[in-house]
Amino acid sequence: MSALLELRGIRAAHERINVLHGVDLAVAAGQVVALLGPNGAGKTTVLRVAAGVHPAASGRLLVGGRDVTGADPRRLARAGVCLIPEGRGVFPNLTVRDNLLMMTFTGRSRAEIEEIAFTRFPILAKRASQQAGTLSGGEQQMLALARGLATDPAVLLLDELSMGLAPLVVGRLYEQVAEIARQGVAVLVVEQFAAAVLGIADHAAVLVRGRVQRQGHPDSGLRAELSALYMGSPL
């Protein structure tokens, strides 16, 4: 299975402090890859490098087999890379409908975008005139996902989807993520809490202090090793 997104030997730094030390990671179309690890491991930096938001000090970034190392976020977005950052990334003072309206820059009509959003997340149709900041945490995350899907991504990068949400809500959101992947999207999910995502992941990698310490299928013994690889994440 060929990779749609690939990081090869990626090194990156924050203010001259090295945080990634040669990360190798690949995500194929239709695949969900979970990137796990404790706080400070460098997980978010991996996503930011993949989206072109943070520069790689060395290594290569490939999308669809093309070397896009050093490309800016706009170019990567045009190539189909969509990052949904931690914190949900919605405009709280705008209504649900206006949050979706802002995505018409993608070339899709308002009607098309709303159809995508409201078909996948019917609750958003009921909240269409409500300010995004007054939605529940789960509904805000649904809106963030709907905005991302409006870009028709080939690669979807998700950062801490479960942050601050009840387990039942998280489970429902990840069911939607699995469905998105089944439509051919390559999905890379950063999670601190392994149990939240391993049920839908096809592949998992554990990042510890900027290095991938272990990766493989979630059922290949990786679950049993997680607590030994890093402490503080419930399984």
Image (cartoon, rainbow, N blue to C red):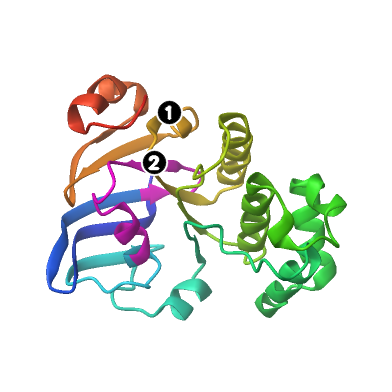
Q: Residues within 10 Å of mark 1 (few under 14, many from 20)?
A: some
Q: Position of residue 88 (x, y in %)?
A: 56, 57
Residue pictured at 58% horizontal, 41% vertical: 182
For the C terminus, the quadrant is top left
Q: Is residue 29 magenta?
A: yes
Nearer to us: label 1 or label 2: 1
Vertically, is 71 above or below 30? below
Residue 133 lies, with reference to residue 180, above or below; the image says below
For the N terminus, the quadrant is top left
Mark 2, residue position: 34
- Front position in the image: 134 or 3: 134
| Amino acid at pointer 1 | Ala
Q: Amino acid at mark 2?
A: Ala
Magenta segment: 27-48
Q: Earlier in the sequence, mark 1 or mark 2?
A: 2
- Residue 48 in the image, given as x and y percentages of width and height: 36, 65
Q: How many marks?
A: 2
Tell whether position 76 is magenta.
no
In-front residue for pair 62/37:
37
Q: Position of residue 34 (x, y in %)?
A: 39, 41
**Residue 170 quadrant:** top right
